[in-house]
Image (tube, grey):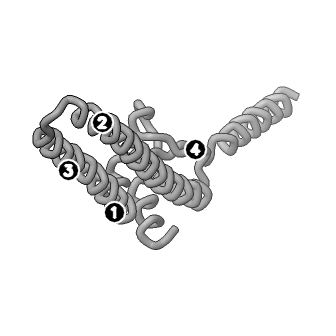
Amino acid sequence: MKKFKLAITLLGCGLMFGFAGQAFAGGIGYIDYAKVQEGYPLAQQAIKEVDAKALELQQFMVDKEKQYKSLDTPVKKQNFEEATSRELDAKQNEYARLRNIKEEQVFNNIQAAAKKVLVEQNLDAIVDYRVIFVGGVDVTDQVLQKLKSGI
């Protein structure tokens, strides 16, 4: 009888540990988002486009400053300031819109690639590497490969 109880207890413990192990079988993956952005050609192109728009905005301001200095009357200067202010607001809004569109596009592509890696690697979640203190699986290179291959 004692052997039977011992066998049942061992079987029960084995099943418990077996199910617990299966519940966490996937694990947690993590990526270095900055590394993915650096290695992702679309992200680099987006950065170039946004930087070009920022330089365009700076050049606009330099040109307007030169024009302002050439004005001779206070009325002309005030009218110029008002017109320039409206133009600058429009250009800043355009810049912010472009930056947001590009950031969202890059983020969505990286997220889609990470989701594919999540499924392929049978992971429970993928987080940023700064969240992981100990453990986890680095899937940065797999996500980067997915992005380079067109997801």
Q: Are marks 4 and 1 in contact (CB under 8 Å)?
A: no
The three-letter amino acid code for the residue at tag 1 is Gln
SS under mark 4? strand
SS under mark 2? helix
The three-letter amino acid code for the residue at tag 3 is Gln
Could you say where residue 73 lies in the image, as x and y percent from the top left?
17, 33
With respect to residue 125, does 2 lie above or below? above
Q: Which mark is residue 79?
A: 2
Front tag of 2 and 1: 2
SS under mark 3? helix
Front tag of 2 and 3: 2
Could you say where residue 64 lies in the image, as x and y percent from the top left?
20, 45
How many C-alpha atoms fall within 10 Å of the one at disc 4: few (<14), some, or many (≥20)? some
> How many angstroms separate mark 4 from mark 1 (CA)?
29 Å
**Residue beneath disc 4:** 125
Could you say where residue 38 lies in the image, as x and y percent from the top left?
30, 55
Asked whether residue 140 is in view, the answer is yes
Residue occupying the point 33% across, 59% down: 49
Total number of numbered discs in the rendering: 4
**Residue beneath disc 1:** 45
How many C-alpha atoms fall within 10 Å of the one at disc 1: few (<14), some, or many (≥20)? few
Asked whether residue 138 is in view, the answer is no
> How many angstroms separate mark 3 from mark 4 (CA)?
45 Å
**Residue beneath disc 3:** 59
* Marked residue nearer the N-terminal end (4 or 1): 1
With respect to residue 64, does 81 lie above or below? above
Query: In this rendering, would 127 be left or right of 57?
Result: right
Residue 14 sits in which quadrant? top right
